[in-house]
């Protein structure tokens, strides 16, 4: 009896998630019995689980779409690539954060555990085959992140931002669920592949469906941090400890992208006309508010928060094109953005010291004098984020703009490039501080060897992918045909 | 006559590699680093002369072509090649850069390795801009070029350097982003036609409706007009020039401004001939305003660098005027020879202005290094203490005012003749520059160089040292050579210019 049931569930496709659940349990159990001095075991085990998950994912990698758990779970090449990328991002995030957490007495198991559960949430979202699975992943990710923001329990600011994040996030999750329920009520299915047909049957112009779609879009926009659902982004980025900001600012972006792709592009593709116009409004507003408000920031974390909002606008541009080219471009943009964002936050962690956060723009003053190489790395990251060639950020913008122009929205491309000029201003200000100003103190850069090596690789990746972007673009094209 | 090795790649990557080596070497090894910088730039120049000696002067086709797949997803190629328009500009670039290195030899004491490295990397990128035959490669290099220049002005500039360099970067960035949208649009058009391509040559043959052409033309115009710069988008230039270190001003005036003119000839004219024909009045009037109005503005400047910056804008007005006269001439009387003459004049003017403005900025640099002031009123009677310098200064000033037998005369003369063929009043206004140019340049020389010794600073001046003499001497020789014997330059350009005139007479509607 149980034999055929198990095989019909086709669980082997979901091995990576199953492995991750087991690994999390192990880490959790081991961590309980560790003294603070041997906390490095948790750290090592977490990294090990990521490596293990990567091996499992590669071993069970699929060449075409496969489903499990009666359609609630999907494995496809895009999912595999995004998962591998997410493992890498989380691993790099852990390694960047290690020194910082140790110096602040925050080197506790929670950071790594919550990081892994958040990652599990991302994996579930990536592999979601039904709206319910999507929601499961969203909640797992969000709850981990709420807790993570507050995990420095002595910090009032962090507690405040965690509270804001939680309250707003809960509303957004509710909105998303409400939207799902309306769609379910009208179509009678939660399964994404069945939804495609059901929507066509019901008629994509049915007012009830559009009503539900509006709620879904609002939920997605919140998770992305798109205007007007962006209020949490600056406060959380600013208030959370920098390692948490680094985490929130990177891997969950992959999840947001996949959320939009699975729900909008796969499930509700017949309603493209409706969600395209909604996303246009979100994208334009995000680019305007994000870029303009970022100019006024003096705190680097807050500035990067607004810059994220504007980048979300660009990712949405790719998605709203509603074509394969557009989805590929948005995926490329997301991956490129993650590489750039993790480097920028990594730089803040590198420069931070005992009692010195290095999270204000002026803290980078005269960096070229102290450490020409890391000033160059930061410069490359900033130019890349601004979309100036020859760095990877330029190609991300180009791909997205190409997709938008292709569907005849030339005006939107023009608006986007003009706003990227506004963006250039605040990135240039960081470079100005590093290169044109004299250092305020003569303290050398302290960061440890691992962080230095990783940042070096990170900076070179931005440059090399900028000169030879073909490989990454082709990868996106291969997994998203 | 073609070479078997990829000369253009060498010209691009040799200086960039040397620049990276300098960065790794750092300030500690600067004694060797300087020689490395000089060696690399001189070698680059020596190699670039091969372009001239092996150039086929009978064809308008791209030569020394290189084509390697770059980004297959966008059908973009690492495509290089030069024709009669690009080749002289590349040689100008490789010619000026070693002089900048020599001029900085003992002057730059703050972070010298990064200074030389910036110029070397910049040189490679600039050569690439002139050599790119793929629009995407062109755009990448065109934007990338801003980065070293941003650093050069910002780190080694004067008191208001941050303001100037931000203005420079944002102005040019704003100008060029819309060009990117146009390039993407045309790429999509080539896709619709069956063969996706970013090749500039394919864009030149792409049929485009008039409305699309007008929009594309405006986006190109914005990008190139900012770079040239044309009135009224010129305001970044005086600031950038004034604050930039001598080398930065020289490269800016001698080469970067030329990219605007080059862009008009490579992109605007052949890709949007119908829109250019419709809007030629706009460019011509803006050019004439630049020539006349900016000439008056130059007259009242108190700062030497600012005066030369305004003079650059006025002189670059001839470049845009000469380029767009062609449309007027072809429309009015189908005057193909006149059209070619205008474009010839624009090209010669670009090369000549590159030499003369570079030389004048070097002259200001020589004075600035000694007195640390750019104010005209801080000088007077320099000839008494620096006779050799004074001789050079007067020569370049005369060249700047268009004296026959100097290169400044040839370009202006060709453009004025061409404007006569189009309209008397064009020629009249353009010729005003002969008076204005002479007025502001010679008045500058009179106040700075001649007269009695004005103050103790001037009395204490030492004449040119060997290094400075070499730099100014080489430039003086080039200015005179081009003025007395411009034929080699004109011969190189002839087939390309004829081809260009042919292209712009064919409607793409």
Image (cartoon, rainbow, N blue to C red):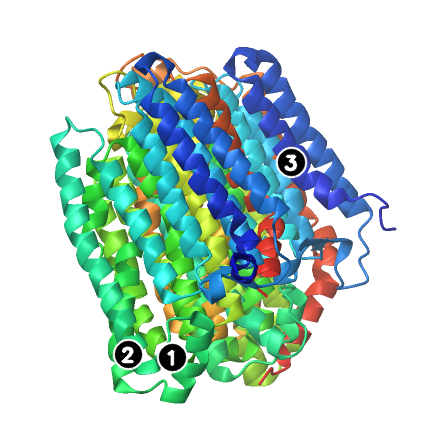
Question: Residue B42 at what x, y percent from top left?
Answer: 68, 29
Front residue of A246/A431: it is A246
How packed mark 1 is, by other alpha carbons closer than 10 Å (few <14, some 14-19, many 20 or more), is many
Residue plotted at (54% across, 68% down): B268
Q: Secondary structure at mark 2?
A: helix
- Seen in the picture, residue A407 relative to B120 is either above or below; the reply is below
Q: Secondary structure at mark 1?
A: helix
What residue is disc 3 on?
Answer: B477
What residue is disc 1 on?
Answer: A271
| Foreground label between 1 and 3 | 1
| Subunit under mark 2 | A
Asked if labels 1 and 2 share a chain, the reply is: yes
- Seen in the picture, residue A251 relative to A277 is either above or below; the reply is above
Front residue of B483/B180: it is B180
What residue is disc 2 on?
Answer: A185
Distance Cα–Cα, label 1 vs label 2: 17 Å
Distance Cα–Cα, label 2 vs label 3: 85 Å
| Subunit under mark 3 | B
| Foreground label between 2 and 3 | 2
Asked if labels 1 and 3 share a chain, the reply is: no
Q: Furthest-front residue in view?
A: A1
| Subunit under mark 1 | A
The answer to whether one can see residue B452 in this image is no
Residue plotted at (28% across, 79% down): A185
Q: Secondary structure at mark 3?
A: helix
Q: Answer with mark 1 or mark 2, whichever residue precedes in sequence.
A: 2
Residue plotted at (67% across, 37% down): B13
Asked if labels 3 and 2 touch by Cβ distance under 8 angstroms, the answer is: no
Residue plotted at (42% across, 53% down): A124
Asked if labels 3 and 1 touch by Cβ distance under 8 angstroms, the answer is: no
């Amino acid at each position: 009896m149980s034999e055929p049931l198990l095989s019909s569930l086709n669980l082997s496709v979901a091995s990576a998630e199953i492995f991750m659940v087991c690994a999390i349990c192990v880490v959790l159990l081991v961590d309980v019995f560790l003294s603070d001095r041997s906390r490095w075991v948790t750290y090592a085990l977490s990294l090990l689980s990521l490596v293990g998950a990567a091996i499992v994912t590669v071993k069970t990698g699929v060449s075409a779409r496969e489903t499990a758990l009666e359609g609630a779970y999907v494995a496809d090449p895009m999912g595999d690539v995004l998962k591998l990328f997410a493992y890498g991002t989380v691993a790099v995030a852990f390694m960047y954060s290690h020194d910082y957490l140790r110096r602040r007495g925050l080197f506790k198991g929670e950071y790594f555990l919550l990081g892994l559960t958040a990652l599990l949430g991302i994996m579930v979202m990536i592999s979601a085959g039904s709206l319910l699975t999507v929601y499961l992943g969203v909640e797992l990710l969000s709850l981990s992140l709420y807790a993570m923001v507050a995990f420095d329990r002595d910090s009032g600011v962090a507690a405040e931002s965690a509270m804001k994040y939680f309250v707003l996030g809960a509303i957004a999750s509710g909105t998303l669920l409400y939207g799902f329920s309306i769609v379910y009520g009208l179509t009678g299915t939660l399964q994404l592949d069945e939804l495609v047909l059901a929507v066509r049957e019901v008629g994509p112009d049915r007012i009830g469906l559009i009503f539900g779609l509006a709620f879904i879009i609002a939920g997605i926009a919140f998770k992305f941090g798109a205007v007007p659902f962006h209020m949490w982004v600056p406060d959380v980025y600013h208030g959370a400890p920098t390692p948490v900001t680094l985490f929130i600012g990177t891997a969950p972006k992959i999840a947001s992208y996949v959320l939009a792709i699975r729900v909008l592009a796969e499930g509700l593709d017949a309603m493209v006309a409706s969600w395209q116009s909604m996303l246009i409004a979100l994208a334009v507003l995000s680019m305007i508010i994000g870029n303009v408000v970022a100019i006024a920031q003096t705190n680097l974390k807050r500035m990067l928060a607004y810059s994220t909002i504007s980048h979300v606008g660009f990712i949405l541009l790719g998605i709203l094109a509603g074509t394969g080219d557009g989805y590929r471009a948005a995926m490329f943009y997301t991956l490129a953005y993650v590489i750039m964002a993790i480097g920028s936050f990594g730089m803040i962690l590198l420069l931070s010291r005992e009692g010195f956060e290095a999270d204000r723009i002026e803290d980078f003053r005269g960096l070229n004098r102290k450490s020409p190489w890391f000033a160059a790395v930061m410069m490359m990251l900033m130019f890349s984020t601004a979309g100036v060639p020859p760095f990877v950020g330029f190609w991300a913008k180009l791909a997205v703009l190409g997709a938008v122009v292709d569907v005849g929205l030339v005006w939107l491309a023009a608006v986007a490039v003009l706003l990227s000029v506004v963006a250039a201003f605040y990135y240039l200000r960081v470079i100005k501080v590093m290169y044109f100003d004299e250092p305020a103190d003569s303290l050398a850069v302290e960061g440890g060897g691992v962080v230095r090596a990783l940042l070096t690789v990170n900076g070179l990746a931005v440059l090399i992918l900028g000169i030879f972007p073909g490989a990454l673009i082709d990868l996106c094209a291969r997994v998203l045909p | 006559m073609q070479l078997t090795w990829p000369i253009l790649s060498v010209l691009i990557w040799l200086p960039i590699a040397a620049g990276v080596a300098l960065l790794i070497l750092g300030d500690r090894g600067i004694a060797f680093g300087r020689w490395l910088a000089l060696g690399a730039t001189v070698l680059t120049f020596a190699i670039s002369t091969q372009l001239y000696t092996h150039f086929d002067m009978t064809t308008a086709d791209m030569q020394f072509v290189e084509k390697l797949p770059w980004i297959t997803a966008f059908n973009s190629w690492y495509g290089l090649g030069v024709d009669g328009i690009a080749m002289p500009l590349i040689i100008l670039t490789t010619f000026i850069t070693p002089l900048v290195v020599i001029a900085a030899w003992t002057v730059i004491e703050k972070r010298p390795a990064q200074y030389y490295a910036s110029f070397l990397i910049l040189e490679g990128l600039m050569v690439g801009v002139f050599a790119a035959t793929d629009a995407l490669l062109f755009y990448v290099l065109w934007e990338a070029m801003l980065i070293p220049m941003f650093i050069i002005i910002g780190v080694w500039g004067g008191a208001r350097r941050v303001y100037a360099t931000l203005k420079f970067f944002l102005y040019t960035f704003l100008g060029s982003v819309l060009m990117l949208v146009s390039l993407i649009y045309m790429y999509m058009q080539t896709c619709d036609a069956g063969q996706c391509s970013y090749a500039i040559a394919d864009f030149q043959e792409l049929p485009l409706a008039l409305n699309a052409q007008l929009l594309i033309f405006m986006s190109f115009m914005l990008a190139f007009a900012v770079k040239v710069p044309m009135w009224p988008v010129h305001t970044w230039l005086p600031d950038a020039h004034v604050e930039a270190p001598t080398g930065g001003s020289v490269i800016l005036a001698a080469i970067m401004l030329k990219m605007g003119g080059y862009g008009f000839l490579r992109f605007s004219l052949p890709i949007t001939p119908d829109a250019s024909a419709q809007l030629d009045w706009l460019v011509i009037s803006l050019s004439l305003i630049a020539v006349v109005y900016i000439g008056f503005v130059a007259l009242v400047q108190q700062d030497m660098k600012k005066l030369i910056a305004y003079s650059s804008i006025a002189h670059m007005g001839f470049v845009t005027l000469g380029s767009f006269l062609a449309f007027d001439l072809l429309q009015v009387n189908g005057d193909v020879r006149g059209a070619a003459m205008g474009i010839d004049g624009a090209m010669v003017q670009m090369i000549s202005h590159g030499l003369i403005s570079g030389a004048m900025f070097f002259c200001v640099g020589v004075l600035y290094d000694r007195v640390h002031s750019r104010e005209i009123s801080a000088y007077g009677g320099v000839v008494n203490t620096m006779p050799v310098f004074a001789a050079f200064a007067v020569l370049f000033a005369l060249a700047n005012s268009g004296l026959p037998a100097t290169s400044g005369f040839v370009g202006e003369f060709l453009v004025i003749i061409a404007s006569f063929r189009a309209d008397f009043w064009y020629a009249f206004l353009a010729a005003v520059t002969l008076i204005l140019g002479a007025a502001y340049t010679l008045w500058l020389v009179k106040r700075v160089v001649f007269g009695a010794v004005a103050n103790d600073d001037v009395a204490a001046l030492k004449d040119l040292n060997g290094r400075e003499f070499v730099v100014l001497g080489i430039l003086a020789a080039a200015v005179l050579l081009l003025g007395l014997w411009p034929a080699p330059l004109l011969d190189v350009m002839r087939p390309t210019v004829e081809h260009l005139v042919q292209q712009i007479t064919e409607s793409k509607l």
